[in-house]
Image: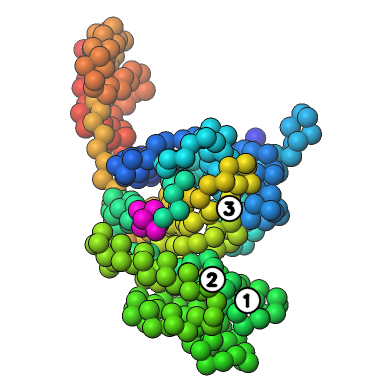
Amino acid sequence: MEISLLHTPDGVRDIYNEECEKKIILEKKLSETMESYGYHIMQTPMFEFFDVFGKEIGTTPSRDLFKFFDHEGNTLVLRPDITPSIARAAAKYFYEETMPIKLYYNGNSFINNDSYKGRLKEVTQIGCELINDNSVSADAEMIVLAISALKASGLKDFQISIGHANFFQGLVDAVGLDRETTEELRDLLGNKNFFRVEEVISKLSISDDAREMFSLLGGFHANVDEIRRVKVKALGSQTITDAIKRILDLDDLLKIYGVDKYVSYEFGNVSAHEYYTGVIFSAYTYGSGEPVISGGRYDRLIKHFGKDAPAIGFAIVVDTLMTALFRQNIDIPFERECELVCFDKDNEKAAILYGEKQRTDGKNIELMPMVYGKDHDSYEAYAKKNYCNKVTFMEG
């Protein structure tokens, strides 16, 4: 056997023993948080038709998709993002529903990133979607739920960066920026290169009011009074005015929830997912260069699948969150009670009957024949390594 067969491809990894146990516990905590807000679990296929993630949907670029074909010649892709799958399913199963639809999911997604970027190509996502509700109250609930999920994970120091997808576009349209400059700014904002953003803005031939509005793109603005002040300088753009008003109304609700200390506002927050239409947000914490949560409002996405319905949602990247927890020395406690029963040949029947009786009573029992020439210390060391808190010997 070639040694290369022991290794995984770039971007994917094996998870086992304690790490795997802790990941499952973390997923359970996050799922329970979703359910505590009234969300219901939904599963969608790991692969879909290519068009579910096509260019007009505004999701992942084609070059970053894992593509393959079925026997009928249809192009299929491993899902790079679960939200479009939920949108498709919602249009199919809830087409006539007009009341709010609350769904959550737990599954893996796949993006064919360049290997040199050092990112995983397969990650686990837990997320939720609130459909048929375009209110600012829905925006607030989604952000509060994201905060609650991070707190449930054990994370203490994190920040939710909130922006609005229409602010940047409204600003660009108001001053008539050319496409090249617009895309340059979008790329810089996506990479959080705020120094370069300021440099580009300083070279623009725009009014002082426009320059002040553009200054909001340059970083985090927790000061709501500043946002309120520049609202009157919205350059005659209803798009900008509506975006700022939505943020201010949202801030009022987040203060009622008492979570405003976790929130900052970043009008330069842009997403790689072009289907976002309103409030967008990301969660950041120490020990991770990537956001642990990304989300936002996507009021036109479900319409691609035949149902005209507003929606908002977010996804937690469990792998990124686990890395952040590890680097911050935040443990995911778990207990696994298991009894290791070691037996010789003469006591095999007794050990089997004992094990079956204990399992019937809800106990965890691992049976191990003593045929390996090991002493008691070896079996006790094995038990400790495999989280067995009790060892019983049946022999002699």
**Which residue is identified by label 1?**
173
Q: Nearer the viewer, residue 127 or 225?
A: 225
Q: Give coordinates of residue 314: x percent, y percent.
A: 45, 52
Residues at circles 1 and 2 in contact by the CB criterion of under 8 Å:
yes
Q: Give coordinates of residue 345: x percent, y percent.
A: 31, 10
In front: mark 2 or mark 3?
2
Q: Residue 314, relative to residue 31: is it above or below? A: below
Region in magenta: 136-142
Which mark identifies residue 300?
3
Secondary structure mostly seen in magenta is helix
- On screen, residue 137 versus residue 337, left or right, reads right
**Which residue is identified by label 2?**
239
Using a 10 Å C-alpha cutoff, classify the residue at mark 2 as few (fewer than 14 neighbours), some (14 to 19) or many (20 or more).
some
Q: Amino acid at mark 1?
A: Asp
Q: Nearer the viewer, residue 279 or 49?
A: 279
Q: Give coordinates of residue 12: x percent, y percent.
A: 56, 47
The structure residue drawn at horizontal position 53% and vertical position 53%, both measured from the top left corner, is 299
